[in-house]
Image (tube, grey):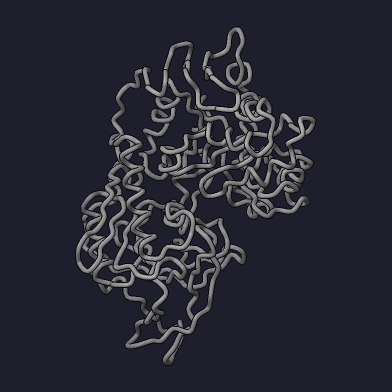
């Protein structure tokens, strides 16, 4: 089951149905969960309109909608989201939830609104809470949230291994997949955490198949079903010796034998980042508008990383010189710019690294140009180079490019083998850690700094956004035409 967010953001609308159908017909069965909204408060009517959602729900491979990260909007009766959920339910599709921290009472209300499942339980009692609300519960284990050791005590007894429980890897990054595998890593972690092996395999196969209404086709071995079979040497080692896809050997001894038809990725992920304008160093200066304050200092909402993704706002007195803020030495500037240079959000990020010239990245859920750093000239050079290569991640120090990861397919992908992109990611992680990155996973810091649903503050189209209170702490600015 795959997420459609980046496809809806990057693929020409007329080609989305063809791409979803083509990918679902590969030896690896890919089904889709259809996003109902964006992730960074961008103007999204065309991409996520009611009419477009209705049309895409007619695609057979679309088996669910979500994940619906804006659960407070659903709880408070957002008409647009409730209409889309009603469309999905009428089409027989599941509604994938995302409700971190929701109380039992709110989970019950969300279930009544159509919520089918949730994967945000981070403690054993939260699993029980979701099950009691009638919500299917996915146990997550990822490089960002390796939660199974905390969750397993709720279900380690065979008698509590409910058919309403499933496993999810929740979007692991490339290095994790290359080194540990995908769902096999999650199954192994479940078994090592005390979940009975048979129950762990059920939570990865027949339970999700039944949840999506596909247990007559997949999830088990029997007459008339699709013969997708993993052959194991040991029940406690989920890495298969042989994989059958539709009854044919697809993988044997770790080597792929199935034929995958070539796909013109460029036809589906059109160029988004292009050198149609030239970012200048002064673009990355933090400026004070007349209404933001007067005098020698301004209280600025510095975004402080508490871990790889969770942040909090730290109101900080920042000196002002000639209309420009002088950031503290222990923060980096965090600037979000439209790829066409039409608007900008300027902020500061603390507890990220101790030193950094300029890092530009198109790899974020907002699909915008995110630039971090302490030197305006280096930030400008990194942003320019990113536009020249069509997207990716670029790091510049003292005027020299020290790392470059081209991602020309929409700024988020490259047509290269997984080991190659994992190798580039390792270089990026090592570079950031050498500069003082103190957290677990730089991948998710860059990816989610623009996500409008994670606490507490984010860089979004609306500005520096207070997620909990639903308000702008520092506004977006429109830029003059380039």
Left or right of residue 303: residue 254? left
Q: Residue at x 30, y 24 (%)?
A: 262
Picture coordinates of residue 279, whole percent (x, y) = 24, 65
Left or right of residue 17: residue 373? left
Q: How many marks?
A: 0
Q: Residue furthest top?
A: 223
Picture coordinates of residue 392, whole percent (x, y) = 30, 50
Q: Residue at x 32, y 88 (%)?
A: 322
Front-most of residues 92 and 337: 337
Location of residue 265 with respect to 383 vertically, above or below:
above
Left or right of residue 14: residue 247? right
Quarter of the view holding residue 115: top right
Q: Residue at x 28, y 44 (%)?
A: 408
Picture coordinates of residue 23, whole percent (x, y) = 41, 27
Location of residue 447 with respect to 482 vertically, above or below:
above
Front-most of residues 283 and 351: 351
Left or right of residue 409: residue 55? right
Q: Residue furthest bottom?
A: 295
Location of residue 212 with respect to 173 vertically, above or below:
above
Q: Is residue 182 visible?
A: yes
Q: Residue at x 49, y 38 (%)?
A: 3
Picture coordinates of residue 449, whole percent (x, y) = 46, 59
Location of residue 64 with respect to 321 vertically, above or below:
above
Q: Is residue 43 visible?
A: no
Quarter of the view holding residue 336: bottom left
Query: Which image quarter is the C terminus in?
Result: bottom left
């Amino acid at each position: 089951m795959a997420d459609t967010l980046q496809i809806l953001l990057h693929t020409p609308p007329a080609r989305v149905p063809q791409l979803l159908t083509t990918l679902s017909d590969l030896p690896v069965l890919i089904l889709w969960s259809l996003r109902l909204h964006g992730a960074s408060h961008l103007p999204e009517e065309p991409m996520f309109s009611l009419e477009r959602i209705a049309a895409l729900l007619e695609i057979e491979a679309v088996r669910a909608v979500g994940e619906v990260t804006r659960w407070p909007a659903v709880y408070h009766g957002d008409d647009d989201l409730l209409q889309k959920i009603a469309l999905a339910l009428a089409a027989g599709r599941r509604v994938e939830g995302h409700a971190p921290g929701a109380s039992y009472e709110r989970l019950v209300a969300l279930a009544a609104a159509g919520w089918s499942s949730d994967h945000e339980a981070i403690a054993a009692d939260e699993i029980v809470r979701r099950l009691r609300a009638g919500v299917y519960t996915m146990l997550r284990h990822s490089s960002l949230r390796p939660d199974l050791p905390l969750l397993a005590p709720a279900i380690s007894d065979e008698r509590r291994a409910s058919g309403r429980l499933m496993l999810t890897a929740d979007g692991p990054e490339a290095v994790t997949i290359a080194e540990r595998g995908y769902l096999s890593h999650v199954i192994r972690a479940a078994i090592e955490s005390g979940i009975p092996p048979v129950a762990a395999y059920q939570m990865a196969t027949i339970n999700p198949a039944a949840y999506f209404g596909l247990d007559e086709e997949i999830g088990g071995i029997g007459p008339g079903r699709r013969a997708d079979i993993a052959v194991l040497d040991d029940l406690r080692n989920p890495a298969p010796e042989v994989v059958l896809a539709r009854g044919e050997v697809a993988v044997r001894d770790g080597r792929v034998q199935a034929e995958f038809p070539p796909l013109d990725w460029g036809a589906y992920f059109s160029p988004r980042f292009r050198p149609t304008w030239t970012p200048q160093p002064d673009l990355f200066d933090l400026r004070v508008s007349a209404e933001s304050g007067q005098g020698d200092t301004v209280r600025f909402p510095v975004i402080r990383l508490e871990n790889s993704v969770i942040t909090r706002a730290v109101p900080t007195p920042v000196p002002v010189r000639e209309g420009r803020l002088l950031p503290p030495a222990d923060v980096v500037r965090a600037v979000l710019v439209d790829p066409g240079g039409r608007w900008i959000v300027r902020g500061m990020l603390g507890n990220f690294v101790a030193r950094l010239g300029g890092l530009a990245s198109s790899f974020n859920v907002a699909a915008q140009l995110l630039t971090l750093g302490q030197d305006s000239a280096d930030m400008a050079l990194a942003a320019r180079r990113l536009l020249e290569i069509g997207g990716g991640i670029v790091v510049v120090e003292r005027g020299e490019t020290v790392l470059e990861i081209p991602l020309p397919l929409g700024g988020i992908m490259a047509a290269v083998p997984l080991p190659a992109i994992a190798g580039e990611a390792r270089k990026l992680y090592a570079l950031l850690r050498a500069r003082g990155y103190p957290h677990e996973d730089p991948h998710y810091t860059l990816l989610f700094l623009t996500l409008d649903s994670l606490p507490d503050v984010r860089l979004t189209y609306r500005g520096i956004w207070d997620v909990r209170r639903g308000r702008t702490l520092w506004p977006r600015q429109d830029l003059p035409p380039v």
